[in-house]
Image (cartoon, helix red, strand yellow):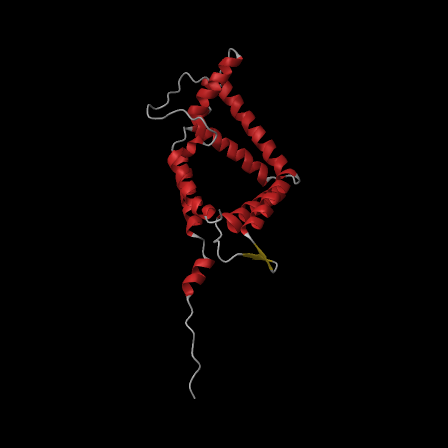
């Protein structure tokens, strides 16, 4: 008696569906490289908190000028302080932290880095790309404006900006000198640099373009 034929199983597609997508891995690598580069370019913390360099600004315009100069010089340190305040606020509000983490994971794995084929199926229902995007947008608005997540984020950013502005207004920048090859920052996330930002955009672009 002949044995039944055994159909070959293609494990390649299964492995591709189980593991993270190349776009996601590329995005994580670029983010990791950007963060490492940013921290490598930060100023010494002892220079940031040098008590002998603090003085009262003579006027509001002097304080504004100090903020601009100090931000150009200490921008990595200031952004680190903002991130620390934000992280502390989220850690002390675990419900908001879990909610925000779930929302971020939903955007990453249900839309940005999910392969377009096969379609998304949840609770026995198939969702199109437009439906998935609509649900994610509505969920984001609800999380930010209905739950406590929005209040936690806004309050943390206000506290962080208050600390940064107060320090930079009272920190005399006369002893600070930017390197000749370093241009002053103009944006909140300018420490990322054009190359790293473009690289991250390239990593995300294929996943987004597939849905256009």
Quadrant in the rendering for residue 161:
top right
Q: Is residue 50 visible?
A: no
Residue depicted at 49% across the width and 52% down the height:
114
Which quadrant is home to the N terminus?
A: bottom left
Rendered location of residue 180, percent (x, y) = 33, 23
Q: Residue furthest right?
A: 146
* Front in this rendered view, residue 49 or 58: 58
Q: Please indicate whether residue 205 sits to the left or right of residue 103 in the image.
A: left
Residue depicted at 41% across the width and 31% down the height:
42
Q: Residue furthest top?
A: 58
Rendered location of residue 12, percent (x, y) = 41, 62
Residue depicted at 62% across the width and 40% down the height:
141
Rendered location of residue 130, percent (x, y) = 56, 49
Residue depicted at 56% across the width and 47% down the height:
133
Quadrant in the rendering for residue 31:
top left
**175 versus 24 height, above or below:** above
Q: Residue furthest bottom?
A: 1
**178 versus 131 height, above or below:** above
Q: How many marks?
A: 0
Q: Residue furthest front?
A: 212
Q: Is residue 146 visible?
A: yes
Rendered location of residue 80, percent (x, y) = 48, 33
Q: Please indicate whether residue 8 sits to the left or right of residue 82 in the image.
A: left
């Amino acid at each position: 008696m002949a044995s039944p034929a055994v159909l070959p199983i293609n494990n390649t597609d299964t492995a591709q569906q189980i593991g993270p997508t190349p776009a996601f891995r590329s995005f994580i690598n670029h983010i990791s490289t950007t963060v490492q580069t940013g921290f490598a370019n930060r100023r010494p913390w002892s220079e940031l908190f040098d008590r002998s360099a603090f003085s009262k600004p003579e006027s509001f315009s002097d304080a504004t000028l100090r903020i601009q100069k100090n931000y150009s010089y200490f921008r990595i340190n200031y952004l680190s302080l903002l991130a620390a305040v934000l992280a502390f606020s989220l850690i002390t509000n675990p419900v908001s932290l879990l909610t925000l983490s779930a929302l971020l994971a939903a955007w990453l794995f249900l839309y940005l880095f999910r392969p377009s084929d096969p379609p998304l199926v949840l609770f026995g229902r198939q969702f199109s790309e437009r439906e998935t995007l609509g649900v994610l947008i509505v969920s984001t608005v609800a999380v930010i404006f209905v739950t406590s997540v929005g209040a936690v984020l806004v309050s943390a950013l206000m506290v962080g900006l208050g600390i940064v502005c107060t320090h930079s207004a009272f920190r005399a920048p006369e002893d600070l000198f930017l390197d000749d090859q370093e241009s002053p920052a103009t944006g909140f996330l300018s420490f990322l640099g054009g190359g790293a930002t473009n690289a991250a955009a390239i990593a995300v672009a294929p996943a987004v373009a597939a849905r256009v």
